[in-house]
Amino acid sequence: ATLDRNGLRPLRYSVCEDGFVVCASEVGAVDVSGHGTVERGRLGPGQMLFIDPSRGVQRNRELKERLAAAAPYAHWAFEGLYDLPVGEPVQEPPDDLEFRQAVHGYTKEELAMVLRPMAGDAYEPTFSMGDDSPLPPLAGRPRPVHHFLRQRFAQVTNPPIDPLRERLVMSLETVLGPRADLLTEDAEAARLVRLDSFFLYPDAIEELERDDLADFPIVTLDATFPVAAGPGGLREAVERLAERAEVAVRNGTDILVIDDAAVSAERAPVPSLLAVGAVHHRLIASSLRSLTSIVSVADDARDVHHVAALLGYGADAICPRLALQTVAAEADASDDEAAVSPEAQAHFEAAIEAGVLKVLSKMGISTVDSYRGAQIFEVIGLGADVVDQCFRGTASVVGGIGWEHLGADVLANHASGELASPGYYRDRKGGEYHTHDKEVVAALNSLTLVKEVPPVLDTSEERAAERAEADVALAHLLQRALRSESSDVYDEFARLVNERPSTELHDLLELAPAGDPIPIDEVEPASEIVRRFSTGAMSHGSLSREAHENLAQAMNLIGGKSNCGEGGEDPYRFFTRGQGRDDKNSRIKQIASGRFGVTPQYLAHADELQIKMAQGSKPGEGGQLPGHKVSEEIARLRHTQPGVGLISPPPHH
């Protein structure tokens, strides 16, 4: 019996005098009376208990000492392992930095909202709301291939772990080189390159390729294709990469480096995820994958999701060269004297590594080795031909765009020549469509009293040219619809919303006609139907006091239930119960792992208790309230300090 490295699942044992042994998660699972004296204990993280009919019971220490003495493992490791530093920060960005950024699809938004925060704070940026821009296959502008993948996360039966409190049992250590057969025990099996992390700087790649690592034959594969080949050149380049990789490994190559450094005015890059995925799956199909390691020098990898996807599809180590060069250039150009290039690059590395640990933890995984090649993603919007060649075995329900489209996107970026501001993260006039345009939100908040309604514009035809006017018109229409007894205004508003550009998969669906209507006297009255209504679990903190209380009042008036979320509730609201329109008590009280605001009084005033095992908006992570939202009032209700960010860890163990 053995316990995992986290020690999350308990294992208790009872060893009886007569040789009877019981192992179970709980004490008392089996009655041991009548078996003489009993030794009781429990296994700690990574510990073992071995029962051998000939040798008896062997505890953790003696068992491991016996196994360690069976062969000169320490000597083999000392002689065979080559420790390679992850490298030193980039000194000088290339002269053609902006050209390379444009070719790889960088945007001004990413520089300001992703790379700069990571380089400054050593953490990936936190956004308050979800992504309301179109899915990549429906987008109006080229998206990175990584965006066609969605991360999966652990469910209740295999809970996520906490990358903050359980950091000590997590590891990013990586080894490069051929892996021996699982049962091989000799010095050759220990001949590997050891890295502290999967993250490499460019000079580490140069050291890998130098002659002093001759014991590890290395081949560098060019991940570019001629622009003159057109969109079809992408697929040809990917197939050529996979073929060259197979030949190299058959010839004894221990480490493959996939690099797009040859990008120029005449050559376009193969997206790193397609290159890595295709090589990885070709080697698996040829039964060669364990004989080599894949190092991706990925100029298009610039955030945590990009890196996680590369790891998930077989990259053993990753060098985000262009991202490091960009961070260095941003630091050099900054007016902030504290912004030093080496420190900024170290912060970027720390942000990527912390982000990958969080991605691992969402699946309950502790080591990057367990995540590498696991393909814990689903594909949204890529065609079967692309999935079969680069992401084989990944769930892909809806199909989507193929090689020609992807090739055209690569060439469009290559021809752009400058960094765009497409509005992926923040709505921009003339940019990528957002379902919650800032004009609509502002109008809904401010244009409550309207005397004249401007002409309504058809956003499906003239969205790009007259976007702002159309959004204001929508806001006016909705406000009129809320006050009007006629349905005409609402019908017009609904028509404009329903004819928006396709953004989600459901926008592509058409409703099947319903059958004959059911007689109204056979349907439950509205007063009974609304009793099943309940609100989403939004805390006081994510919502303002007024909004949170109004939701509770509305649900109580119609007989439904409001869910207070995990942030507690002001105790005065408990005593408004039964006071008609003034009843502000939430019927559903939520308990999360952080236990914020949970008191006996809080629990006593609930009709329903909800134990939150996962966060719908951040699956596998848990709730998070940024520090700037933790006012004195919120801190009082949650029994914490103002200004301190609050995170409910994902697990309940």
Image: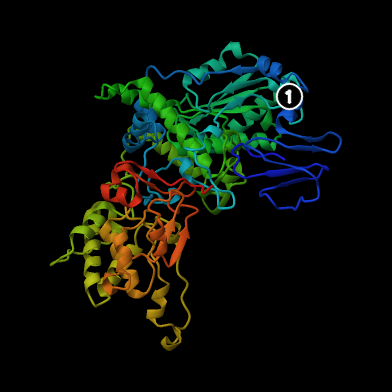
Q: Closer to the camera, 239 or 208?
A: 208
Q: Alpha-carbon neighbours of circle 1 within 10 Å: few (<14), some, or many (≥20)? A: few
Q: Quadrant of the N terminus?
A: top right
Q: Closer to the camera, 188 or 491?
A: 188
Q: Closer to the camera, 333 or 284?
A: 333
Give the colouring mode of the picture. Answer: rainbow
Name the residue rendered at 46%, 83% in the picture. 516
Question: Which residue is most to the left?
Answer: 451
Q: Which quadrant of the figure has residue 475?
A: bottom left
Q: What is the secondary structure assignment of the residue under circle 1?
A: helix
Give the side of residue 181 with respect to residue 53, left or right: left
Which residue position is annotated with label 1? 68
* Amino acid at the residue labelled 1: Ala
Q: Position of residue 565 (x, y in %)?
A: 39, 57
Q: Position of residue 552 (x, y in %)?
A: 33, 66
Question: Which residue is most to the right?
Answer: 54
Name the residue rendered at 46%, 39% in the picture. 305
- Counting labels gives 1
Q: Position of residue 339 (x, y in %)?
A: 30, 23
Q: Position of residue 324 (x, y in %)?
A: 41, 25
Does any portion of residue 233 appear in the rendered image?
A: no
Q: Closer to the camera, 254 or 510?
A: 254
Does any portion of residue 133 appear in the rendered image?
A: yes
Give the side of residue 205 with respect to residue 426, left or right: right
